[in-house]
Image: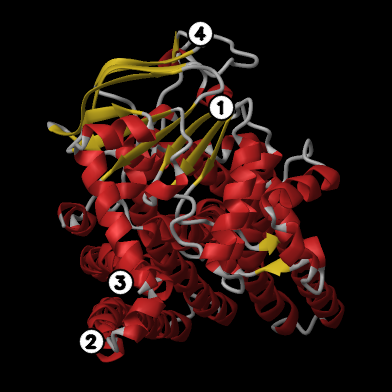
Amino acid sequence: MQEQRDEEVLGKAYDSKLMKRLLSFVKPYSKYVVVAILLNVIVAALGPLRPYLTKIAIDDNIAHKDYNGLVVNALALIGALLFQSVMQYFLTYYTQLMGQKIIYDLRTRIFTHVQKLALKYFDKTPIGRIVTRVTNDVDSLDQMYSSGIVMVFSDVFIIMWILVFMFAMSWDLSLVSLSVLPVLIWGTFMFRKKVRETYRDVRYHLARLNSYMQEHITGMNVVQIFSKEKEELDRFSKINDAHRDANVKSIFYYAIFYPSIEFISSAALALIVWYGGGEIIQSRMTIGILFAFIQYTEMFFRPIRDLSEKYDILQSAMASSERIFKLLDDETFIKNPENPVKISKPNGSIEFKEVWFAYNPGEYVLKNVSFKINPGETIAVVGATGAGKTSIINIFTRFYDIDKGSILLDGIDIRTLDKRDLRKHISIVLQDVFLFSGTIKSNISLGSEDITDEIVIEAAKTVGAHKFISRLPNGYDEEVKEKGATLSVGQKQLISFARALAYNPQILILDEATSSVDTETELLIQNAIEKLLVGRTSIVIAHRLSTIQNADKIIVMHKGEIRESGTHQELLANKGIYYKLYQLQYKDQEKNRN
């Protein structure tokens, strides 16, 4: 809840530090900026040139019946329009191209950073919020880079050129035209003050909307089985209402601001007609100048409106960039050592020495855990839910770092190893299998060029997955839907086993890998496991005690501590915690048979 409240805190309308960081992404494409600014200067000058040519046509050509001069002037106007169109094309192309290149770099940077974050970050951050950063917030920056930064120069240059032409023709009429500026500046200031409050509201509610959608679509089976559609719809409607209201509030301010600009523009036009008409009547001004000023007034307020839109883009970008940089600045990393120890192919000796670990400071889930696994041995870790079994896996693979003690691989502290170097020697099969959209083959190889089709098929055969895969219409090229929705739990588990095998690990970890499969599939996996464990150091987290009777050692966890260890027979003979767990499961199996 605290993070959600933080999302609502308003920052500055313009933050120089944020802008400096945003501009750092522009630096590699500075040549595009230079070209765009030069084109802006040209395009901005060509617009105000047209009223000036019109003034000459009226005062010099039409007034003196100079037909040839009028033709030349008309051709000059057409030429200016054509040249401006060509320049505008190149300006739009280069600014949009630059924007897309920057957004590509930014999205790549964010995704790369997210992949480096420790699991602790994802434990506390809704996935929908991260998705919002990469999609909606980056899209806001896309508008700034493509239509904001460089195109602001266009509006500024247009205003400057208009003022140059206006004061060159008539300084007094120019002052009359600009007399409405104080009202315009005050109105713009009030608009900025009101509208800035809506941006974070919109982004905040959008992030909530994305988080809620992602969570409830993922858990749709739970929603439907408990008939909670009505309740969830009501909750979604409240979030959706808040998002709509935030947008409507923003629209309200724009609905007031733009008509106000039109009114001020019309007032300026009326003042020009009143003052300029009086000057013409008294023969102190020509009709051409008045006509040009009418055109200039219409042109002058257009970039003012555009600048207000650029402010909209800038404000949105400031809010979005603050969120993006907050993500990029998050250093919830499992850090690699500066000079990591190299390990080419470990023997597989694993030792935990007085290890303490807590997900939350002070709340230890592992307490003074010590054990040793010799190369090629298989140990099983058992215990009640919450005993700390999975935490042993999390800290050995360095998904989390320990608080006290040490974990050794071949006598080397794993914190002195490069994470990738450590993990490439480990394969893990989890209880909850995750499959990516793609094919069966890509889910086994995970896109590794070192894993050939032959290795994929051999791994599938070893774990007994080849039989059901070969029956699929497209075999190993069968499309896998998101999260493997079209496959059974047992089939997904077999694919996960094949994936682990294909990487030929020195260390194999099975985290309750057979707890969700039927008896037939379990027999297939058990036969495969017997082959897999040969020559590999293995850690098996087991719920079904019948699957670990042949382990070299069984460790019994209770409330984060090792309470017993030994072989299956030794632990049964001790008649301790393991004996009680085994008896409970045996009784449950007997009841199921009866």
Q: Are marks 3 and 2 in contact (CB under 8 Å)?
A: no
Q: Nearer the viewer, residue 287 or 90?
A: 90
Q: Mark 3 or mark 4, which has the lower sequence index?
A: 3
**Amino acid at the residue labelled 1:** Arg
Q: Earlier in the sequence, mark 4 or mark 2?
A: 2
Q: CA distance from mark 3 to mark 2?
A: 55 Å
User: Measuring 67% from the left and 76% from the top, which residue is drawn there?
Assistant: 54
| Discs 4, 2 touching: Cβ within 8 Å | no
Q: Position of residue 547 (x, y in %)?
A: 46, 47
Q: Label 1: which residue? A: 420
Image coordinates of residue 358 in percent, x first then y, are 21, 33
Q: Residue furthest left?
A: 362
Residue that mark 2 sits on = 231
> Could you give the CA–CA distance between mark 4 and mark 2, rounded to whole angstroms?
54 Å
Q: For the residue marked with disc 4, what is the amino acid?
A: Asn
Quarter where residue 142 is shown = bottom right
Q: Is residue 337 above or below residue 441?
A: above
Task: Using the image, tell me which numbered label, if any, was put on residue 180.
Answer: 3
Foreground residue among 269 and 45: 45
Could you tell me if residue 263 is visible in this image?
no
Residue linked to disc 4: 339
Q: Assess disc 4: are there few (<14), some (14-19) or many (≥20) residues with their C-alpha within 10 Å of its C-alpha.
A: few
Question: Mark 3 is on which residue type?
Answer: Val
The residue sitting at 59% across, 12% down in the picture is 343
Q: Position of residue 384 (x, y in %)?
A: 24, 47
Above or below 544: residue 405: above
